[in-house]
């Protein structure tokens, strides 16, 4: 797949400094010793960009199951390649949709496979009924709450006042002898690669208030015209986008949707917001923004 279009001086280097980041990181460091494994939830459209490298480092010594959430609006062929990628690193990986629960019926079995050696040791010591404890991690808006609510059948969290557990951490018993420890979603303070920030902004993980939505939309259109041109044509009833710049594509879409101001000027802000909303809702089709090398 092609890279993102270069917009020269208009290209944004997105930064984000959440105030609770340090506190959350410390909490995860304190609790990682209490769990047997990690459930990492990522966005199937941006599997690498939606991983927090700080949290990845903290949890790296625990077995991991990776949930590629929102797989229903990601490119299916790309998701298959990503599953192979994560499996090759020793993790278990599942493509799923945490809102509907699609794919999550495999979760318990995958957990058992992931922790087979540890469970065998427990059984050899007469501890076969011991619950498996997993920490759930992920950046904001990636689907952690949807996953936990779905697995816990909407039940309320159980606040565990256990030794070594920060008061207020939430444990969920989901059946099958599995307990989940929820953690707050957290971004990292600086995106060394500007493309990472843009991809997070595309999917809504970074709020539009801190970015220029028109520039963001032009970047998305540039990527789609190179990699998924037919998706643009099908959604906005365009004959072709071949040879058009992102600005020209945006203007063509604005005409089709009647987003023209007095005097015949394109309402760039309005059409940009519309395109971004439709992309995030999956109305532009199944699109993946990055592939494993």
Image (cartoon, helix red, strand yellow):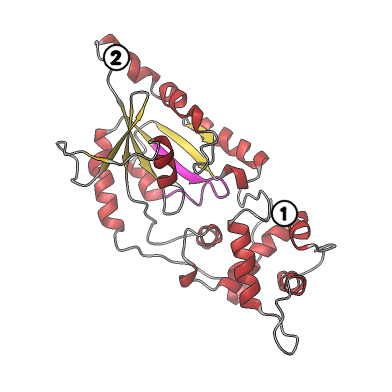
In the rendered structure, find residue 227 and report the number of the disc placed on it. 1
Q: Which residue is mark 2?
A: 128
Residue 6 lies, with reference to residue 97, above or below; the image says: below
Residue at figure coordinates x 71%, y 88% from the top left: 262
| Image location of residue 141, percent across then percent down | 45, 53
46 in magenta = yes
Residue at figure coordinates x 73%, y 71% from the top left: 257
219 vs 90, left or right, is: right
Taking depth in this image into account, of 93 and 61 the one nearest to the observer is 93
Does residue 290 show up? yes
Quadrant (top left, top right, bottom left, bottom right) of the C terminus: top right
| Image location of residue 36, percent across then percent down | 31, 29
Residue 52 lies, with reference to residue 34, above or below; the image says: below
102 vs 176, left or right, is: right
Under circle 2, the secondary element is loop
201 vs 127, left or right, is: right
Under circle 1, the secondary element is helix
Residue at figure coordinates x 34%, y 18% from the top left: 119
Q: How many residues crowd around disc 1 within 10 Å: few (fewer than 14), some, or many (20 or more)?
A: some
Q: Which residues are magenta?
A: 39-52
Most frequent secondary structure within the magenta stretch: loop
């Amino acid at each position: 797949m092609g890279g993102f279009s270069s917009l020269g001086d208009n290209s944004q280097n997105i930064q984000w400094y959440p105030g609770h980041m340090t506190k959350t990181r410390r909490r995860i460091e304190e609790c990682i010793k209490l769990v047997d494994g990690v459930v990492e939830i990522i966005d199937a459209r941006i599997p690498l960009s939606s991983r927090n490298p700080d949290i990845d480092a903290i949890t790296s010594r625990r077995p991991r199951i990776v949930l590629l959430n929102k797989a229903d609006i990601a490119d299916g062929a790309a998701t298959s390649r990503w599953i192979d990628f994560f499996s090759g690193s020793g993790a278990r990986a599942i493509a799923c949709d945490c809102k509907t629960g699609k794919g999550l019926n495999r979760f318990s079995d995958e957990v058992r496979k992931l922790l087979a050696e540890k469970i065998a040791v427990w059984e050899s010591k007469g501890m076969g009924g011991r619950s498996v404890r997993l920490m759930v991690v992920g950046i904001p808006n990636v689907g952690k709450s949807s996953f936990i609510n779905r697995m816990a059948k909407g039940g309320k969290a159980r606040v565990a006042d256990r030794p070594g557990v920060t008061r207020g951490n939430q444990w969920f018993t989901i059946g099958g002898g599995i307990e989940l420890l929820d953690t707050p979603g957290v971004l990292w303070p600086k995106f060394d690669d500007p493309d990472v920030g843009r991809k997070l902004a595309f999917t809504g993980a970074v709020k539009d208030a801190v970015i220029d939505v028109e520039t963001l939309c032009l970047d998305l259109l540039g990527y789609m015209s190179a990699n998924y041109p037919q998706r643009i044509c099908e959604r906005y009833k365009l004959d072709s986008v071949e040879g058009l710049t992102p600005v020209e594509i945006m203007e063509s879409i604005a005409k089709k949707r009647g987003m023209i101001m007095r005097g015949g000027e394109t309402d760039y802000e309005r059409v940009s917001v519309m395109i971004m909303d439709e992309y995030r809702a999956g109305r532009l089709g199944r699109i993946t923004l990055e592939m494993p090398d």
